[in-house]
Image: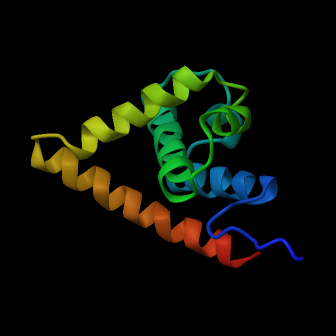
Amino acid sequence: MYKKKEKNKLNDSQVNLLIEKVSNYFDAPVEDVIGKCRKDKLVRTRMYICALLKLKHKMTLKKIGEHLSNRDHTSIIYMLSEYENKVNSKITFVRNNTITTFNNLNEITKEIWKTN
């Protein structure tokens, strides 16, 4: 028997590449993004990384946390809830901007996934 490769599953090097590309998109240093700094720009970058890894690639909360400086799963849940709040915002600009940004970043993910 052969092991079927699961669609949309990223290996560790692809996750690191995704983190790097999303960080570049927001013009944020990767070290700061995976670090503990709580500046708005870095928090927003982490939020999109979490959303991509969870929603598009079905990565576990624990695994996402491991890639972001061993953050606890509750931190990842909080970032995902913040993303959902923005997507469901009654303020059209916030909602549209969040969805557009996610879709742009999803294209980056597709490129990474195709490389393997």
Check the image and name the residue furthest to the front.
1
Left or right: residue 5 compared with residue 100: right
Relative vertical location of residue 25 with respect to residue 54 in this rendering, above or below: below
Q: Where is residue 12 in the image (x, y as percent from the top left)?
A: 79, 52
Left or right: residue 37 compared with residue 92: right
Q: Nearer the viewer, residue 23 or 81?
A: 81
Q: Position of residue 32 (x, y in %)?
A: 65, 32
Relative vertical location of residue 16 with respect to residue 44 in this rendering, above or below: below
Residue at 53% across / 42% down in the picture?
A: 50
Residue at 50% across / 41% down in the picture?
A: 45
Q: Which of 73 and 98 is in front in this view?
A: 73
Quadrant hosting residue 8: bottom right
Relative vertical location of residue 84 with respect to residue 100 in this rendering, above or below: above
User: What coloring was used for the rendering?
Assistant: rainbow
Quarter that holds the N terminus: bottom right
Total numbered badges shown on the rendered structure: 0
